[in-house]
Structures are given as structure tokens and as C-alpha cells.
Amino acid sequence: MNSDEAQTEIPPFERLGGEPAVRALVDRFYDLMDLEPGYAALRATHGSTLDESRDKLFWFLCGWLGGPDHYQSRFGHPRLRARHMPFAIGVKERDQWVACMDQAMAECATPEELRTRLKASFFNTADWMRNKGLT
């Protein structure tokens, strides 16, 4: 990619469809987490309701994907690893988070090339969050 292409690349936020699409993705992600038995370990790391988590992930993803920085304007720097330290996150939780998000992206019709790119980024971020053993 040359510098002109890099400067004109459309941010993932826009490619997804902006705030309505990010909200739909986040809502589907948490709906799946709540309903699918395969995501039970991941669901167990959350509180009894997911409303606050839905909002925080939506705000964070908007900025992370190249859109408005809603999260930072509300809470400051995300400090993701520090904010997730109170939760036991191992390989199982990481893998369930990535699988749940990938399923949500598929069900929300995220373009395949973008989905593949985002899945790799989500995996790297989720792997960096691990704070317990390798199981």
C-alpha cells in the first residue's frame, strides 16, 4: 500500500456502517454470550446484567474502529489490561470472546475481508488480556 492509499483507506468504523452497525454488532455479541452455552465461561466473567458492558464495549469499539472516541471522552484512556485485571481471563475466556465476536460479525454480515482482519486484531487484544494460567 502506498502513502496515498493509506491516507484514503476507509476506517473499519465506516466500513461497518457507523454507530448503528457497531451497536448492532455489540448487541448481537452480548445476546450470543447470554444465550449460547458455548460461551458460558465468558458469560460468567460478567455481572448479572450486561447493560453496562454493552454500552462500554460500544463506546470503546466506536473509537477503536476509527470513529468517535466516546469511551475516552467518558472515562479517559481505556487502559484495557488494567481495567480487566479484576476478571480471571485465561485461554478459555479469550477463545470464547473471540469466537463470540466472530459469530456476531458473521451474523451481522461484516464483509469477509474486514471480518478476517478484525478477528486477528480482536485475538491479539484478547490474548494480551490474559491474566491467569494457560487453561
Image (cartoon, helix red, strand yellow):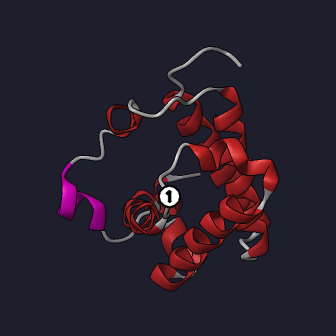
- Segment tinted magenta in the rendering: 69-76
- Give the answer, above or below, for where 8 lies relative to 127: below
User: Residue 4: x and y, percent?
Assistant: 47, 61
Q: Quadrant of residue 114?
A: bottom right
Q: Is 73 one of the magenta-colored residues?
A: yes
Closest to the observer, 113 or 100 = 100
- Residue denoted by label 1: 48
Amino acid bearing label 1: Ser
The quarter of the picture where residue 72 lies is: bottom left
* Above/below status of 73 relative to 118: below
Q: Is residue 19 magenta?
A: no
Give the camera-side residue of 125 and 34: 34
Q: Quadrant of residue 16?
A: bottom right
Element on which disc 1 rests:
loop
Residue 85 in sight from this viewpoint = yes
Q: Residue at x 43, y 62 (%)?
A: 7
Residue visible at 38% across and 62% down? 56
Instruction: Work out which residue is located at the far front of the displayed protein and give it.
Output: 48
Instruction: Characterize the local packing of mark 1: few (<14), some (14-19) or many (20 or more) Cα atoms within 10 angstroms.
Output: few
The quadrant of the image that shows the C terminus is top right
